[in-house]
Amino acid sequence: MNTSNSLIIRFATGADYANWLPLWQGYNAFYGRAGNTVLPNEITQATWGRFFNDSEPMYALVAESESKLIGLAHYLFHRSTTLLHPTCYLQDLFVDETHRGEGVGKALIEAVYDQAKQAGSARVYWHTHESNINAIQLYDKVAKKSGFLLYSKVLG
């Protein structure tokens, strides 16, 4: 999944953990999961492990430039009541702030599109916070707003 001479989009490997972790922490901090609200380490470890568990439909792509990880995309496949084939959900997308605006996010999204097509998926979807203006500008170029609103309730 080489996108240019200097940017490589590829699947994460077990050896990437130490370089993936700061990106994962940056992603979570962006959404307010830092300091007192940081994700427990057991969630990070479970998430990382799922990427390498063949029984899990969860995958991790990374963007690499000059031998350094600069972005990540985590996606998963699930069933739908309106489609026969699996649907792809792009759950996490993050690019190191020093590399934003260089096409890394777009390259990661396009790589997810490619993986979804190979899996027989007819749709990729995701959501973002309404305050994520820079990402929304990219998303408006690479996908169509569905018009659906997201509702959620924390149980417990």
Image (cartoon, rainbow, N blue to C red):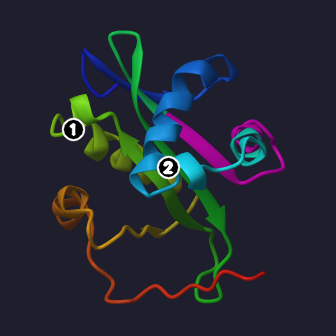
Amino acid type assigned to the residue bearing label 2 in the image: Asn
Residue 112 % position (x, y): 45, 49
Residue 104 in view of the camera: yes
Question: Seen in the image, is 153 located left or right of residue 32?
Answer: right
- On-image quarter of the C terminus: bottom right
Magenta-colored span: 48-61
Classed neighbour count for the residue bearing mark 1: other residues with Cα under 10 Å, few (<14), some (14–19), many (≥20): some
Along the horizontal axis of the image, is 110 left or right of 41?
left
Relative to residue 23, is residue 126 depicted above or below? below
Q: Are marks 1 and 2 in contact (CB under 8 Å)?
A: no
Q: Reading the chain from its start, which is encountered first: label 1 or label 2?
A: 2
According to the picture, the residue beneath numbered tag 1 turns out to be 100
Is there any visible trace of residue 118 in the rendered image? no
Residue that appears at 75% across and 38% down: 45
Quadrant of res 103: top left
Of residue 23 and residue 8, the one placed in the foreground of this image is 23
Q: Local crowd at mark 2 within 10 Å, few (<14), some, or many (≥20)?
A: some
Residue visible at 67% across and 51% down in the picture:
58
Which residue is under mark 2? Answer: 28
Query: What's the residue type where badge 1 is placed?
Result: Arg
Residue drawn where x is 65% and y is 16% of the image: 15
At horizontal 19% and vertical 63% (from top left) the residue drawn is 133
Disc 2, SS = helix
- Find out whether residue 27 is within the magenta segment: no
**With 120 as the anchor, is 99 left or right in this view?**
left
Where's the N terminus, which quadrant?
A: top left
- Position in image of residue 155 (x %, y %): 73, 83
